[in-house]
Image (cartoon, rainbow, N blue to C red):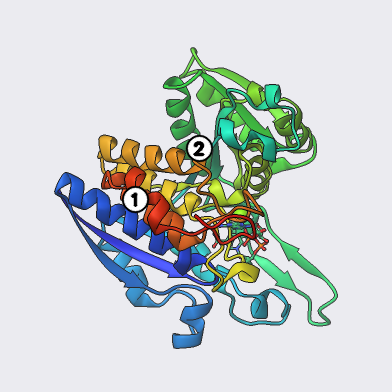
Amino acid sequence: MEKKITVICGDGIGPEVTKQSIKVLNAVAEQFNHKFNYDQQIMGACAIDKTGDPLPQATIDSCKNSDAVLFGAIGHPKYDNDPHAKVRPEQGLLRIRKELQLYANIRPISTYPTLQHLSPLKPDRLQDVDLVIYRELTGGIYFGEKTLSDDKNTASDLCLYTKAEIERVAHLAFNHAMNRKKKITLVDKANVLETSRLWRKVVQEIAQQYPEVAVDYMFVDNASMQLIIKPKQFDVILTENMFGDIISDEASVLSGSIGLLPSSSIGSGTALFEPIHGSYPQGAGKDIANPVGSVLSAAMMLDYFEMYEEAALVRRAVSWALEHGFVSQDIDSVNYYSTSVIGDLMKDFIEQKAPSEINKKYVVLGKSTII
Ligand SMILES: NC(=O)C1=CN([C@@H]2O[C@H](COP(=O)(O)OP(=O)(O)OC[C@H]3O[C@@H](n4cnc5c(N)ncnc54)[C@H](O)[C@@H]3O)[C@@H](O)[C@H]2O)C=CC1
Ligand SMILES: CC(C)CC(=O)C(=O)O
Ligand SMILES: [Mg+2]
């Protein structure tokens, strides 16, 4: 099969982690006789530096003409620390989500037995945790009208949702729940917010079309706690844009690191695949970032291409690396491997070369061992 993939590395650690996914995808293409044609495009701070625009038209055009988009991360401290900046890297990401109508962001959260020691939670709380967050991605407060008064002392961000916006993402979540444990938790703040009450009403209506799915409603403040104390109660979490953004970073502690978590963004345009983390500027250029979130996003892209065997192989490569301790600094601060070595190891695993060559070929960067 031949696929065109727009690759947007972005800023900070984005290029370093995305490079590992490309290595892995190339190994998959080789093994399964596929052809992946990559079209590299820019977005974020690097695009502002080059063109003045965080989302140049060429990037939009490439995405719209591709089978999928593989994205790293955007963001730079020079904008984060400047409240007066007129143009921001994040605008590029929000705009591409809108341009491609990517209204659902799907963030699966799983745990790995060998990483459970990383979590502050007791192992029995983590066993069998397997949940997926459906985050609405093109509406809500991130997209509402923004105001700043002339004296710059008063600001507002409008949170707006329509019934149609809620319905389309809710149907995706219910359909997914039907193939899982048939449970949905709507996370909202319906005791305070009118938008959340609309979410509840629309979800209650939709639930009638899915009588086999048990629906639970939880306020976001309680959900933030329940995710940590009783994560096994969740199957599919459905929530609006900002709550989904926040609780998915929180849920990453169940897995062990935010660097492990992938996502897919789907809707009516070209689908986009990205790790849930940001550009981690402190780690940029150091070859220390965890590439797993990006590589698992590439696996989600392979699923989207209906290359299920290929996606499963990529996931096995990730599990193999984690189980054998081929992990980055966020997972093991003493014995850790570089981003690029972990990418090489996963590529070798896919090419069935890894086990015999490991000891000769790779070094540990951390202070204790050189093998
Ligand atoms: N999708 C995107 O492109 C996103 C972009 N951002 C942007 O990224 C920049 C930094 O934002 P932060 O709030 O610091 O979030 P961040 O996700 O970039 O980093 C937060 C912390 O998570 C850890 N981390 C993140 N990714 C990691 C990885 N792959 N491996 C190991 N550790 C990792 C690091 O300890 C880091 O300090 C900002 O400019 C922000 O706007 C933030 C979130 C998402
Ligand atoms: C620009 C932000 C909304 C990015 C982010 O934090 C995310 O999508 O997770
Ligand atoms: Mg986020």
Q: Is residue 199 visible?
A: yes
Q: Secondary structure at mark 2?
A: helix
Q: Position of residue 316 (x, y in %)?
A: 38, 37
Label 2: how many Cα within 10 Å (few below 14, some 14–19, many 20+) = some
Q: Nearer the viewer, residue 46 or 322?
A: 322
Q: Position of residue 252 (x, y in %)?
A: 63, 43
- The image quadrant that residue 90 belongs to is bottom right
Instruction: State whether residue 275 is above or below residue 92.
Output: above
Query: Residue 323: which disc?
Result: 2
Instruction: State whether residue 70 is above or below residue 299.
Output: below
Q: Residue at x 67, y 45 (%)?
A: 243
- Give the residue type at disc 1: Glu
Query: Residue 202: which disc?
Result: none
Q: Position of residue 9 (x, y in %)?
A: 43, 68
Label 1: how many Cα within 10 Å (few below 14, some 14–19, many 20+) = few
Query: Residue 357: which disc?
Result: 1
Picture quarter with ligand 3? bottom right
Q: Secondary structure at mark 1?
A: helix
Q: Residue at x 67, y 53 (%)?
A: 159
Instruction: State whether residue 234 is above or below residue 285.
Output: above
